[in-house]
Image (spheres, helix red, strand yellow):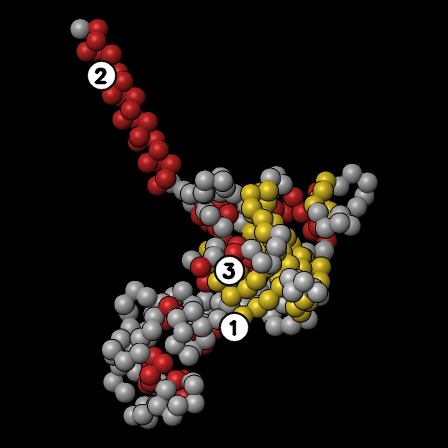
Amino acid sequence: MKLKYLLVLILGIVIFSCKDDDDDKDTFDPVAQALIDDEKLVECLQTHYLTDDIAIDTILNGETPLYNIVTTDYIEYNDIDYKMYYYVEQVGIGKQSSRNDSVQILYQGYLLDSTKFDENVNYTATKSWFHLPQTIPGFRYGASYFKEGEKFIYPDESFTYVNTGSGVFFMPSGLAYGNTGTFTIPNDAILYYFLDMGRVVIADFDGDLVSNNDEDIDGDGSVENDDTDGDGIPDYGDVDDDGDLILTKLEDADGDGDPRNDDTDGDGIPNYLDSDS
């Protein structure tokens, strides 16, 4: 009898524990979390400063707060208002990255408590390259604040980039890994990155002769939500944007290397976006 009651008690604990977990998941409020994150970010920026060797440290002797030197970027993502904060130490001298390009960078990623979770310190490393549409939203925005540098080749034919765009940007958890986190990043973690922008490549991810930026059909700066033929593949990754079984690059009727200016039926819709062209 005692064993029976013990089993019932254990089962009850398991059921109520599971229910509590589900409730926590169901009651997560991303809007409230965005406000909490911003309060934490502002507090951090007001109590820390940028050192001469470009690191973040606690204000102890009246140093200039980060909050006084950063720029605020107001971002709407998934119908939620966020704020990112960034500081450009060097502007760079070349192309400015968009959120849709490919970039070659050096970086260090930190949690708000200054725990480093990732870095790349070499431009020849595989992890120096990022296709921005495939990164977290905050990283896409952060990279777009900087211009590329110029390539410098050493006598042994190794290389680096000089005069790069560089600085630091801070993102709320809703533009990072949200309330799920990763193996190394906790739930609801605010992140910041130091970044050096070596090179910017105007990307054509699917090789269809239309750059990622030009596949932003609705003009909102993001290519993730543009899917002309509704097949679940965003246009920037879809080799047949209009689903007419003709590859986009083959809809370049005049052969000038740009399918965007070909409109065979004169309806104002380029062939590559017109399933009835």
* Dot 1 alpha-carbon crowd within 10 angstroms: few under 14, some 14 to 19, many 20 or more: some
Q: Position of residue 117 (x, y in %)?
A: 55, 43
Where is mark 1, residue-wise?
202
Helix, strand or loop under label 1: loop
Amino acid under label 3? Answer: Phe
Amino acid under label 1? Answer: Ile
Q: Position of residue 190 (x, y in %)?
A: 55, 45
**Does the image show residue 119?**
yes
Helix, strand or loop under label 3: strand
* Dot 2 alpha-carbon crowd within 10 angstroms: few under 14, some 14 to 19, many 20 or more: few
Where is mark 2, residue-wise?
8
Amino acid under label 2? Answer: Val
Examine the rendered structure and indicate whether residue 182 appears above or below residue 211.
above
Per the rendering, the mark at residue 245 is none
Instruction: Specify the quadrant of the image occupied by residue 113.
Output: top right
Examine the rendered structure and indicate whether residue 196 appears above or below residue 61.
below
- CB of mark 2 within 8 Å of CB of mark 1? no
Q: Nearer the viewer, mark 3 or mark 2?
A: 3
Q: Quadrant of the C terminus?
A: bottom left
Q: Quadrant of the N terminus?
A: top left
Residue appearing at x 30%, y 82% in the figure: 274
Q: Position of residue 222 (x, y in %)?
A: 45, 67
Q: Position of residue 82 (x, y in %)?
A: 52, 55
Residue at the outermost right position:
61
Seen in the image, is 91 located left or right of residue 256?
right
Residue appearing at x 25%, y 79% in the figure: 244
